[in-house]
Structure formats: C-alpha cells, structure tokens
Amino acid sequence: MLNLEPDSDYNRVVVTMAGDSASILAGALNACRAAASLIDMRNHKGGHPRLGAIDVVPFIPVSETTTEECIQIAETFGNIISQDLNVPVYLYESAARTPEEKVYQILGRENMRVLKKN
C-alpha cells in the first residue's frame, strides 16, 4: 500500500497500491469483499452520490506495467467480484468493451434515484 486517503466530505477512502499483478488483484478483491460485508449503505451519509460500498476500482499502469496488463487485471477482477458479490461491474476507459463505455462519467443525483433499490 502506497497511500491511504480518507475523505470525510465524501465519506470514502482512496487506497493506492502497487505490486505484481497477482498481489494487486488479490488485494483489490479482499478489500472489496471486506467493504461489501462491513458497509451498510442504508446508513451511509455523505455529499457524494454513490451506488454501493465499492465505488471505483481503477487499475493504472506504473513503471514497467503496460495498459494491456491493467486491462487483464480489470477484466479478471470484474469477473470474480461480480460472481462473488453478485453485483454489476462496469469496465471503463481502456478496459471498456464498447466506445460508449470509454469515458467514465460520474452519475448525478437524478440518475442515482433511478438506480436506488426501494
């Protein structure tokens, strides 16, 4: 772990990790499994629109890691986490599967109401 940045305004934590592909994948999976099991979104407070306990999990190339390697990690992560937690996963930017998914756009509050489960 390189950095842990809590943000009380958004009621979230940004974690920055670096390592080999297997370690990064395992760390991201374990962190997301823990978040999903411990965070109850019904009690969540904060000014930032949110879909769930896990928001964005980007895999970014650094040093000698290639974008292609990050895409592979993102795809593997998405497949595992969607099956383990039974949640939708959206790949974006370089990992996007269609041109429409290429650009990551933050969902506004109006769109959040449509997606919110009653």
Image: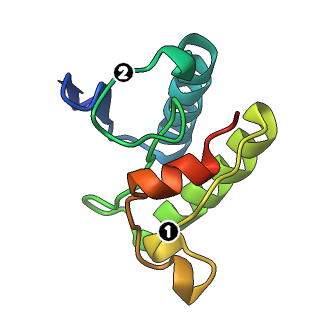
Identify the colour scheme used: rainbow
Quadrant in which residue 72 is drawn: bottom right
Q: Amino acid at mark 2?
A: Lys
Instruction: Using the numbered discs, state the Cα–Cα distance from disc 1 to disc 2 in whole angstroms.
Output: 26 Å
Of the residues under marks 1 and 2, which one precedes in the sequence? 2
Q: Residue at x 57, y 64 (%)?
A: 91
**83 is higher (above) or lower (below) than 58:** above
Which residue lies under the disc numbered 2? 45
- Residue placed most toward the observer, 11 or 74: 11
From the top left corner, tell me how far across and down residue 23 is, in percent.
50, 35
The secondary structure type at the circle numbered 2 is loop
Q: Is residue 43 visible?
A: yes
Q: Residue at x 70, y 33 (%)?
A: 118
**75 is higher (above) or lower (below) than 78:** below
Q: Is residue 58 visible?
A: no
From the top left corner, tell me how far across and down residue 83 is, in percent.
81, 41
Q: Amino acid at mark 1?
A: Tyr
- Residue placed most toward the observer, 27 or 52: 52
From the top left corner, tell me how far across and down residue 37 is, in percent.
63, 15
62 left or right, relative to 117:
left
Quadrant where the N terminus is found in the figure: top left
The total number of labels drawn is 2
Q: Which mark is residue 92?
A: 1
Q: Which mark is residue 74?
A: none
Q: Residue at x 45, y 56 (%)?
A: 110
From the top left corner, tell me how far across and down residue 58 is, in percent.
41, 53
